Amino acid sequence: MSAEAFERSISAGGVIVFPADTVYGLACDPTDRAAVDRLYELKGRRPSKPAAVMLFDAALALAALPELGPRTRAALERILPGPLTVLLPNPRGRFPLACGPAPGTLGLRVPRLEALAGVRVPVLQSSANHAGGADARQLQEVPESIRAAADLVIDGGELPGTPSTVVDLRRYEDGGAWGVARTGAVPYMELAEALNAK
């Protein structure tokens, strides 16, 4: 699957089933209301529940958020790419369709994915399951109703199956405060070594 085909589907308002570095995910254009609504409908997920914005290159992610402070940017350079969802301050209200009722917070994902490394556009990303359902480690574990309705389905074989660790860096810039909001693929001690670095 080429990055160009992925980008074409996103730009046409498509919803994609794709292999992340953790579990299978759904992706669409984070600025396209109809596509976002469709992704949420496929999952049976409340529109008020935030999702993450995924970029496939760490440098692109940092360029998309120029307002981040130097301490936070340096931390992101140490921990990304990888199986993390990073909660960041969002003072400019970027990607509002992904932020739900909390526009001041943005969830950011930058996976380590060689197959999609050439993708240059951001996507709104969520796990490819029904809301509250089990994460899909293999493509056949993605509900048939989701696979049948998606515009593009990419089979990446068997994935690790552990969701991303969610790390909160919203107060990191001022005093280095951080926390883990969800335990996942990246161990706490590995984050501590990177985020407590002076």
Image (cartoon, helix red, strand yellow):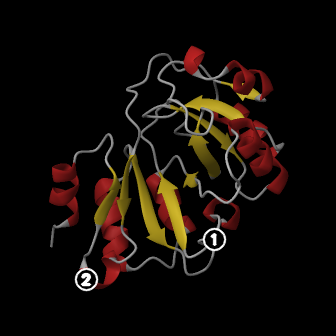
Of residues 116 and 163, the one nearer the viewer is 163
Q: Are marks 1 and 2 in contact (CB under 8 Å)?
A: no
Residue 142 percent across, percent down from the top left: 60, 23
What residue is at 35 percent from the left and 78 percent from the top?
Answer: 171
Residue at mark 2: 175
Pick whichever, 2 or 193, lies toward us: 193
Q: Is residue 155 above or below residue 189?
A: above
Q: Residue at x 36, y 69 (%)?
A: 169
> Is residue 108 rendered to the left or right of residue 182?
right
Q: Which residue is at a point 46% across and 32% down the rendered structure image?
A: 114
Residue 90 vs 140, above or below: the answer is below
Q: Secondary structure at mark 2?
A: helix
Residue 44 placement (x, y as % from top left): 70, 40
Question: For the residue marked with disc 2, what is the amino acid?
Answer: Gly
| Residue reaching furthest to the bottom | 174
Q: Is residue 42 left or right of residue 130?
A: right
Can see residue 75? yes
